[in-house]
Amino acid sequence: MKCGIIGLPNIGKSTLFNLISNSKALSKNFPFCTIEPNYGITKIPDKRLYELKTLINSNKIVPSKIKIVDIAGLIKGSHKGEGLGNKFLSHIRETNVIIHMIRCFNDIRVLHVEGGINPIRDKEIIDIELQFKDLETIEKRLEKTYKNKKSISTILLQKVFSFLKEGKNIRIFPFKNNEKKYIEDLQLLTIKPVLYVCNIDDKNDFNLKNIKEMVKKEKSTLVVLSLKIKSYDQKKNYISGIDKIIKESYKLLNLQSFFTIGKEEIRAWSIPNHYTAYQASSVIHTDLKKGFICAEIIHYKDFIKYGSKEKAKKAGKTFLVGKNYLIKDGDIIHFRFNQ
């Protein structure tokens, strides 16, 4: 599961990538500083781990993690191959969530490929390029399925095609029931969930109100932060912003965390929502899944409330579950299995 950072060149994507993933990707003041994507891993901020450590006094904590990809800047005409656009668009196709970064800072020392700062225009440039690529993808599929004009997938594709031509992203298309499954294999770009990030300075807001309205219409999330830190308060806001980007990305990936605890370590494990206990066991080790007997569950909130496994058990807050139990975010689990 990957989150890809996209946007125009020279907006701070590689800087954000380095900060999120603690990497050292090249970040310079010229377009296409990034050619090949940079890959990194980021830890998911989770205060629950530290609260559990306070009670258990474990030797270490291990947070959940996700993959982050820094993708080269797109420009007008990327869907036609401008600026190596086709290559960059294929990198976006490989991601599960898009972090769409928008430049909202004015610094004459940092070049802008469009010649001036205009966040609304910049957002629309990226949207249009992704939409054009999706139109091209759907058109090719429709050419192959023209004989099956009455099939569910063909009818749906025609509707989505018309929707895109109106300049709308597929993620806000009114899908019914399980319609999405008919077009999943196309890996369309504008269907991917998106988190918008505005990189601001301390002097201009460049119509953030208008951007917020656009993002709200898409039912997406917006994070506003400055990558330039000049004061203690700005540092606090910056840390809060970075944490929010990571947490929101994790949420958009439809992931949740369960915990395993012990004196040696407390660890958070990432699993998709709606995973069963049986499926979750294999995330730790395939042997657990092979020999699965049951799982002992205490929810994090109950563990914190009662202060220990023993007290939670006396209060009737621990229970044994079978293979089909649906894991809840924050469950503390001990798997029982045949070795």
Image: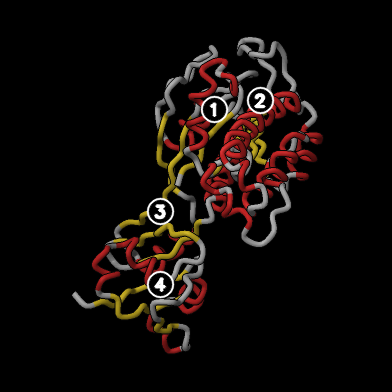
Tag 3: amino acid: Pro
For this rendering, which residue is in front, 165 or 6?
Answer: 165
Q: Indicate which label's residue lies in the foreground, 4 or 2.
A: 4
Up-down relation of residue 15 to residue 145 (above or below): above
Answer above or below: position of 321 versus 162: below
Q: Are marks 4 and 3 in contact (CB under 8 Å)?
A: no
According to the picture, the residue beneath numbered tag 1 turns out to be: 13
Q: Please state which of residues 16 and 185 is positioned toward the viewer in this rendering.
A: 185
Work out whether mark 2 precedes mark 3 in sequence or the reverse, and give the earlier one: 3
Residue 289, percent across and down? 30, 69
State the image coordinates of residue 59 (x, y, percent, origin top left). Answer: 29, 59
Dot 1 surroundings within 10 Å: few (below 14), some, or many (20 or more)?
Answer: many
* Amino acid marked by disc 4: Ala
Q: Are marks 1 and 4 in contact (CB under 8 Å)?
A: no
The residue positioned 27% from the left and 62% from the top of the image is: 285
Q: CA distance from mark 4 to mark 3?
A: 20 Å
Q: Earlier in the sequence, mark 4 or mark 2?
A: 2
Under mark 2, the amino acid is Arg
State the image quarter where residue 164 is shown: top right
Residue annotated with mark 2: 103
For badge 1, the amino acid type reads Lys
Q: What residue did someone put label 3 on? A: 63
Please tell me whether mark 1 sits on a helix, a strand or a loop: helix
Q: CA distance from mark 2 to mark 3?
A: 31 Å
Query: Label 2's element?
Result: strand
